[in-house]
Amino acid sequence: MQPPSQLSNMDWGNWGKYPKNFDPSIHGRFDPAKYYGKADVPFGEVKLGELGSWFARREKGPIRLAQMIGRAYWRWQHKYVLPKKCGVAPFFQMTVTAMIFFYVINYPKLRWHANYKYH
């Protein structure tokens, strides 16, 4: 473990700060569900022949993946959880997601439980 003086001198990058492309005078209030980088063609509008070049333009890496997951989480929150009358949709979505997740992690044990006919 490092002493506190060394931890304070570390470069934490953009941790806890706004994205580098965010400008409050242009974008207004900060929205964690919005991508503030350069706009590109949405995935649904990409043609099959352009798919390789579209993936080549993406920024890759674990930080970009974490940012993408965070934006998707906040979009889900804004659409299903945070409205005043959200209903039961988020609870059913979380339940079904948990069921699928636990089925996948237990599949190696479950696949041997087959029903056999002995006659």
Image: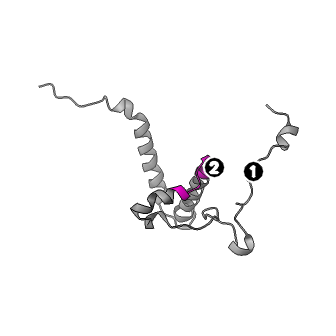
Q: Secondary structure at mark 2?
A: helix
Q: Is residue 113 left or right of residue 36?
A: left
Q: Name the quadrant of the C terminus.
A: top left
> Where, by quadrant of the figure, is residue 116 drawn?
top left
| Frontmost residue, 85 versus 41 | 41
Residue at the top extreme of this rendering: 118
Mark 1: few/some/many CA within 10 Å (<14, 14-19, 20+)? few
Residue matched to label 2? 63
Bounds of the magenta segment? 56-66
Q: Secondary structure at mark 1?
A: loop
Mark 2: few/some/many CA within 10 Å (<14, 14-19, 20+)? few
- Where residue 110 sits: x, y (%)? 35, 32
| Frontmost residue, 116 versus 63 | 63
Residue at the right extreme of this rendering: 5
Q: Residue at x 30, y 29 (%)?
A: 113
Q: Which mark is residue 13?
A: 1
What's the amino acid at mark 2?
Ile
Q: Are marks 1 and 2 in contact (CB under 8 Å)?
A: no
What's the amino acid at mark 1?
Gly
Q: Looking at the image, tell me whether mark 1 or mark 2 is earlier in sequence order.
A: 1
Q: Residue at x 74, y 74 (%)?
A: 25
Q: Name the quadrant of the N terminus.
A: top right
- Where residue 29 sits: x, y (%)? 70, 70
- Where residue 112 sits: x, y (%)? 31, 28
Q: Which mark is residue 85?
A: none
